[in-house]
Amino acid sequence: MSLSNLRLEPEIKADAPEREFTIKARTQGQMVRARFFRHRGAMIGFGAIMFVVIIAYTSIGFGPIPGWWGLDFSSTGELVNEGRPTLDLIPFVDGDGLAIGAHPFGQDTIGRDYFALTMRGTQISLMVAFVIGILSTFLGTVAGAISGYYGGTSEAVIMRFTDLLLTIPVLIVAAVVGQGFGDSGPFFLAVVLSLLIWTYLARLVRGEFLSLREKEFVEAARAMGASSTRIIFRHMLPNCIGTIIVSATLTIAAAILIEAALSYLGFGVQSPDTSLGLLISTYQTAFSTRPWLFWWPGLFIITIALSVNFIGDGLRDAFDPRQTRVRA
Amino acid sequence: MAAYIIRRVLASLLILLAATFLMFALVSLSGDPLAEFVNNPDQDQKALLIQARTEALNLDKPFLVQYFLWLGGALGCIVPGMGCDLGVNLSNQPVTSLLSDAFPTTLQLVLAATVLSIVLGVAIGIISAIRQYSAFDYTITFAAFLFFSLPIFWVAVLLKEFGAIKINNWLADPAVTIPVALVMAGFSALFFSAIIGGTRKRRTLVALAAGAGGIAVFALLVTSGWFVNPGMGPGLVTLGALAGAVGATLLFTNLENRRVLFIALATAVVGVVIAYSATPLLEDPSWFTLFGLGVVATLVGVGIAALFGDIDRAAAIRASVVTSVIVGLLVFMDKTISSFAAYSASVNGRPIATVGSKTPNFEGTFWETTLDTMTHLALPTIAIMLISFAGYSRYSRASMLEVMNADYVRTARAKGLTERTVVLRHAFRNALIPIATLAALDFGAVIGGAIITETVFGWKGMGVLFTSAVGNFDTYQIMGVFIVTAIAVLIFNLIADISYAVLDPRIRLS
Amino acid sequence: MSTEILNVSDLTVGFPTDDGLVTAVRGVSYSLKEREVLAIVGESGSGKSVSAMALMGLLPKTARITGSIRFRDEEVLDMTPRRYREIRGQNIAMIFQDPMTSMNPVYTVGDQLAEAYRSHHRVERKVALGKAVEMLDRVGIPQAKDRARSYPHEFSGGMRQRAMIAMAIINSPDIIIADEPTTALDVTVQAQILETLVEVKDSVNAAVILITHDLGVVAGMAHRVLVMYAGRGVERCDVEDIYRRPRMPYTAGLLGSIPALDSAGGKLHPIAGAPPSLINLPAGCPFSPRCPLVSDRCQTEEPQLLATDLAHHEVACHNWEQVAASPDPTLIFRTAAVEA
């Protein structure tokens, strides 16, 4: 084949099919989701927490909606078998096989069904934790975004304010507030706690915004005349979404434990309502005689905190490409 | 640098001012210190009580004046010459004396736990990072997550039951019971199979061997009556000292470096000799004596290293110092444990304590008193450590992983350095920067965080001071605890920033 | 001429990933003589850096390496880790692309150089530091004694790279591997660094493997050139042949895509398309989707590196004779661009 042909009739024919030899492209969202679902711990945690949420809210009902569990958490009654749990998981040992019985978690000292009590405690603890997680994330993101994007006075003010809040130990302020305004209910407590712990996320978001602010795509957007709001929401926030989501999850896990600690000290959720921390606090001395009063709420706290922590870890791995495993 | 520190101190003082004001307002708003008198039926007594309290707490004055009066008293603590007055609490006790009793107690509680958590957590985090995705890594990661999710007060109750009551029961009549033997076997198996990693087959073999060995050693100890009258004796101490010397050598150079190895071993022997020839001195020593002896032993070791170190002088000196420290710790442990029998008798056979920081009215030798402190510290320390260590190990693992992928680590390997040097001198040194900052910040927060632990274990420290004050709306007591805690936080924040500049030369220029 | 000190034969490196096995290097072979400069040229993803890292033993443990690397009668791939450590930094040294991140930020430059020396020579720290200062001087860093006490972030980019060169030659290695040494630097500094490299290589009698994607860099320094594409060597010849007598369409395309001074105002002629994914390689020649000379044989049978009409010149192309026959091979790609 002579070269002269090439000058006039190039080999690359116009109608030759474009041969694609690249890997199928995936969006970042898809990649993140795929990595998340591969994280075994996160999946187990997710399952566990879904299970807990469903059981807690459907069993004894919530608000006006009734549940499928017959007993409620405040009615006292006769102590059956000294309030021991009727749950029997080992089949055929006592001859009864798998049984749930009337009081699977036992009863407390005045005859209340402990399963219902634990479920109620779980509901409250979950609610407080999620409210804190969502609200503090929202506050932290807004504060961090504003101070990171605008800089100047607003940044200085917000950062000094966060310094201030970080100086004050959360437990101390929370205790004072809890004691003073504790009668206003667990929701109020959750709101107050949120106001104290948004500072950590604010610093993180501010840091991310500071580095993003100098990136070319932000300059380009500004050059095209995009408004500040649009730049923040459409360009910069999506890049921080990983940090924000991971932080929110970890805040929820921490919030569960903080609320439990507060209630344990007596400054959190108060009677007649209950939370998991309060349950443990009330019955801690009963450990040697009625261990079930102590084990159940503890196990639930641990399960919730552990699951959320694993989910947070899974999310962190999903968003951070450097963690990709090389299969050995 | 000096200018930077001064600026930060001034900024911190301003923040402190604002924080105290906010806190004062919050506390005053949240409750009424006179509330407990409201229902007093005796009108005369009620009036008297109200008047007394109002005077003591300046309740008749406007809020701002109250604050400034308190502030004036507080400033007196910093400025020498003026009296330090933080007000009185509801029982008319001066807050300053309450704090000066409570603060050392809290410090004692958290210091050991935090230091141990940091050292252990960081070490395990680093090993986890080096052996990423190994069974060790997964186990530690899961354990860290688990401990992280534990409520400390719940753990404390469990510890009190199993760590104290059950163990005290067992110690009263030590016997090779099945549950205890299994626990021993389990720990031994886990420990050794974690250290000696490798393939699944090898690990299982090691676990089985270690488990069996653990039970055997345990049975031996029980039958020889070691649990009734424990001690290590010069033999074990010397063995441990020599092993420590080997370990110290490994840390700074490798085992083929005979020169450093022999210097370290020599230091170990010298240390042991000094310790046991000074036996009369060590019967009931003071801290001063102990410190003096330690310094002497270390100096001798350093002298040997400097004289014979030659090219490896630097590594030899470091290994020698570490060895001396190890020998000192071993001797200390030996003496303390040896007084166990006497101690146990004085506390009616229940050595591990669950309440308080020390046995009231305890009289004994230095070692017995030390043992007393340690047994009281044991459970709270374990409780704090479980949770704190988890955080540190996760954090140092992440920090180390990030550093291990850095380009300069690749360069270090390309230079032909041993893996040990690459990991310790290059990777760890850089991973240390964020870890040190975190540790400093954590130290600051730890004083405030001890509240729960103190409540559970009945230690009369700052935490208990705080909870009782909040319950009664005791303004000045709350403020007292608050300001001490806030100052601790600010000081450690400053230390964190300074340590960042010290450890990272890139920061120093600004 | 001189003896052969390095012989790489059929080197293959694969990495298992979540998406499959990525074979970054697929059977690369070349040799290196004493004091010779071999330039390995290729785009990103061609496998040039990975093959060099394989030489140094710096690949992750999960990498699967086959083939043979013989350094002076020793089979490198069979070496114990201890022997490898002896060689690294002493017989074979490496200079990396980004000098800022390649040096530890918390130790002084002098310390890091001294460390390189002390890891292979048992001397006192003072002696090693003296050697470090001597090396810094040799690479043209002014006030070397003071500079040795500075930290890496206090150096400019060019000086940092010089310091890296100093670190590489401090043990008088037999081979210096320079992985894109000028890519992270300003253009004005690039020439200086290359000059420094040439000088020091002569002063320590080292051979150099220069890895780059820039054909301009190659012209001044190299004796021999290996062009890599998609993990394979596709052309291997003396440096002059690359510019005057290429036999591989890819090489011709590379040359043709360089804008020349006298073409100002004219069209640029890149090679259309993109390098293939190493997981999803086309059958036959990996360059075939982009090659204007593609024939049916190209799409079914992968060409091997075989001899051509010129001495010391091997090429992996079925149609190399067409390239040889053309007076100006860079024009091969012009027609496609005109049509597009």
Image (cartoon, coloured by chain):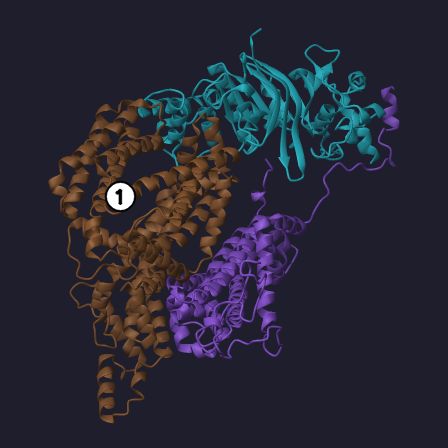
> Where's residue C250, x and y in %?
73, 25
Tell whether A242 sits left or right of B116: right
The foreground one among C314 and B369 is B369
Q: Residue furthest left?
A: B280
Q: Is residue B445 visible?
A: no
Residue at image position (28%, 31%) is B242
Q: Colour of chain A?
A: purple
Q: Residue furthest top?
A: C1
Q: Colour of chain C?
A: cyan
Query: In this figure, what is the number of numbered marks?
Result: 1
**What residue does disc 1 label?**
B226
Q: Where A263 falls versus C209 (above or below)?
A: below
Q: Where A186 falls versus C107 (above or below)?
A: below
Q: Residue furthest front?
A: A95
Image quarter of the C terminus of chain C: top right
Q: Is residue A13 visible?
A: yes
Q: Which chain is brown?
A: B
The foreground one among B481 and C303 is B481
Q: Chain ID for label 1?
A: B
> Where's residue B233, x and y in %?
22, 38
Image quarter of the N terminus of chain C: top right
Residue at image position (28%, 78%) is B65
The foreground one among B236 and B332 is B236
Tell whether A168 sits left or right of B85: right
Q: Where B95 falls versus B136 (above or below)?
A: below
> Where's residue A95, x and y in %?
56, 61
Q: Residues within 10 Å of mark 1 (few under 14, many from 20)?
A: some
Q: Amino acid at mark 1?
A: Trp
* SS at badge 1: loop
> Where's residue A233, x and y in %?
61, 60
